[in-house]
Image (cartoon, rainbow, N blue to C red):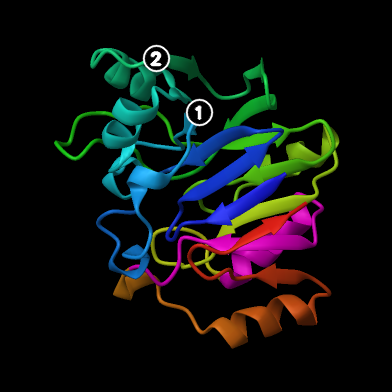
């Protein structure tokens, strides 16, 4: 499993030649100006919620790739009305895709489209692959529901928002890593806007002091699990 960071909360995941994008907000992110969305491969696009900073590039990418959109019922219905192929989900539900089993889990946040219409309940994704399991938290506060995840499977990586103000900050993300029983953390949803800028070295130190590994990837950088 290869995971590439495209800035903000945007991810690329490659599993056995299947390409997955998560929350593509790239073209309007000045920090990701070197990423060309027209070169990104996508068989599936997973969307945690409807905010513009998570779905901005969906239409352009799907029109080119014909990727299937996986999200909550309301977001899936929104894109299905545009003629796109979708797979709707809701909290607690799982589905076996060709790249692994996806479970849609609780996130505490809000969710609306750019025009203010309702975007369903926000969520996160647990992806259970053939060899590796990851948790993509989405935009969320710290929540006790995270404790349910390790009751079902052991995580190899937890991808957590760490920018504070709109989501968890560093302190709560450390607690979240305890809740999900995973000490290997990839941070996201930070630095894009002034509200969520962080001190990288201080963030890494705080995780290190708790015997945890916080990875803050450069935009376009990837890791393999």
Q: How far apart are marks 2 and 1 (CA)?
A: 10 Å
Q: Residue at x 67, y 36 (%)?
A: 126
Q: How many labels does the image show?
A: 2
Q: Residue at x 62, y 19 (%)?
A: 93
* Pointer 2 residue: 85
> Would residue 182 be counted in the magenta stretch?
yes
Lateral position of residue 222 relative to residue 167, left or right: right
Q: Which residue is drawn at 28% across and 20% down?
A: 78
Q: Which of marks 2 and 1 is nearer the N terminus?
A: 1
The x, y position of residue 156, in whole percent, is: 80, 49
Indicate the quadrant where residue 23 lies: top left
Q: Nearer the viewer, residue 113 or 128?
A: 128
On residue 84, which mark appears?
Answer: none
Quadrant of the drawing holding the N terminus = top right
Indicate the quadrant where residue 106 lies: top right
Q: Can residue 25 be seen at all in this image of the molecule? A: no
On residue 44, which mark appears?
Answer: 1
Mark 2, secondary structure of its residue: loop
Lateral position of residue 152 relative to residue 90, left or right: right
Indicate the quadrant where residue 114 lies: top left
The x, y position of residue 66, in whole percent, is: 39, 22
Tell me where the magenta segment starts and ends, as one range.
170-192
The x, y position of residue 17, in whole percent, is: 65, 33
Q: Can residue 128 be seen at all in this image of the molecule? A: yes
Mark 1, secondary structure of its residue: strand
Q: Nearer the viewer, residue 90 or 192?
A: 192
């Amino acid at each position: 499993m290869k995971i590439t960071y495209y800035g903000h909360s945007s991810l690329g995941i490659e599993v056995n030649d299947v390409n997955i994008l998560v929350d593509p907000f790239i073209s309007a992110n000045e920090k990701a100006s070197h990423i060309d969305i027209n070169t990104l491969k996508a068989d599936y696009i997973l969307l945690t919620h409807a905010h513009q900073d998570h779905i901005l590039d969906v239409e352009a990418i799907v029109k080119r790739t014909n990727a299937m959109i996986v999200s909550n019922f309301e977001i899936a219905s929104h894109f299905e009305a545009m003629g796109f192929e979708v797979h709707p989900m809701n909290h607690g539900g799982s589905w076996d895709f060709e790249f692994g089993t996806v479970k849609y889990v609780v996130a505490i946040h809000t969710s609306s489209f750019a025009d203010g219409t309702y975007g369903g309940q926000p969520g996160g994704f647990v992806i259970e692959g053939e060899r590796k399991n990851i948790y993509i938290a989405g935009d969320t506060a710290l929540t006790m529901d995270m404790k349910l995840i390790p009751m079902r499977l052991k995580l190899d990586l937890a991808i957590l928002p760490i920018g504070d103000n709109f989501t968890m900050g560093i302190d709560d993300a450390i607690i979240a890593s305890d809740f999900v029983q995973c000490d290997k953390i990839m941070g996201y949803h930070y630095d894009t806007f002034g509200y969520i800028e962080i001190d990288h070295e201080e963030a890494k130190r705080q995780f290190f002091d708790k015997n945890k590994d916080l990875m803050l990837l450069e935009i376009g950088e990837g890791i393999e699990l």
